[in-house]
Image (cartoon, grey):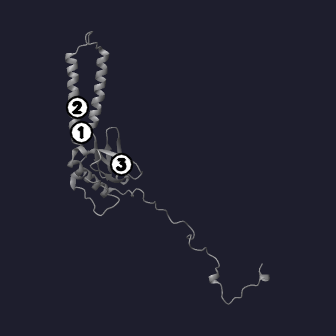
Amino acid sequence: MTEQHPRPDRPHRHRPLAGHDRWAPFAPRGAKVVAAVLAVVVLVAVVALFAFVRPNSATRLGPLDYLLMIAFCGVLWGILWRQATVSAVPDPRGLVVRNLLTTRRLEWAEIISVRYSADRAWAQLDLADGDEIAVMAIQRADGRAATAAAQRLAALVDAYGTAPERGAPPEHPAPDGPAPDQPAAGPSTADADPDQPEPHEEDRP
């Protein structure tokens, strides 16, 4: 797999899929399965704990210990739920990137390019402000499906993005007045009358 750079050089334009598939959400496949399996394991462990382990002097477990276990399992379920709902949702205005810890809305004009290759855990977006953001919805663990998803996202950026290439010099309006390499307006020796005599030293002020 090679990195996708749809914006800087455009010898071939990526074409987004036509119709509804163009705006289909990006979501990891393997991560959802892993999160679901782990959630079931945690649930079974909690049920077994309450069914077979009673708070008494032999187990040295009290009500507070059970409350802490429930709180820990709740946090773990929250992390697993967040992992299972990682996504990137495109629409005509931009892209909503939902990662494990953050959710960010991007306009297409903010995105310069999509990077994805075999040595990356997930896809990455290069933004016009110099920032970079991971797209955990497109993960290397999904193999060819991830490659196809990265290409579709690159096609959307290529078709709808208008951000300038990072590092390109900004365009400045021309300054007022004469250009630096042009002489200012006024008399010039080249415009003087060749028949007029040169003034003598004593006639000069």
Q: Name which residue type carries label 3.
A: Leu
Front residue of this view, candidates 180 and 117: 117
**Cα distance in 3D space between marks 3 and 2:** 32 Å
Residue 174 x, y percent position in the rendering: 51, 66
Q: Quadrant of residue 41?
A: top left
Q: Quadrant of residue 37?
A: top left
Residue 65 x, y percent position in the rendering: 30, 17
Residue 60 x, y percent position in the rendering: 28, 12
Labels 3 & 2 near each other (Cβ < 8 A)? no
Determine which of the numbered discs, if any, sits on residue 31 in the image. Answer: 1
Q: Name which residue type carries label 2.
A: Leu
The answer to whether 101 is drawn above or below residue 72 in the figure is: below
Q: Assign the C terminus to one quadrant of the image.
A: bottom right
The residue shown at (33%, 50%) is 94
The answer to whether 81 is drawn above or below residue 13 in the figure is: above
**Cα distance in 3D space between marks 2 and 1:** 11 Å
**Cα distance in 3D space between marks 3 and 1:** 23 Å
SS under mark 1: helix
The answer to whether 136 is drawn above or below residue 71 in the figure is: below
- Find the residue positioned furthest to the right: 202
Determine which of the numbered discs, if any, sits on residue 38 in the image. Answer: 2
Q: Dot 1: few (<14), some (14–19), or many (≥20) neighbours within 10 Å?
A: many
Q: Name which residue type carries label 1.
A: Ala
Marks 2 and 1, the one that precedes in the sequence: 1
Q: Dot 3: few (<14), some (14–19), or many (≥20) neighbours within 10 Å?
A: some
Q: Dot 2: few (<14), some (14–19), or many (≥20) neighbours within 10 Å?
A: some
SS under mark 2: helix
Q: Report the residue marked by disc 3.
A: 106
Labels 2 & 1 near each other (Cβ < 8 A)? no
Residue 161 x, y percent position in the rendering: 34, 56
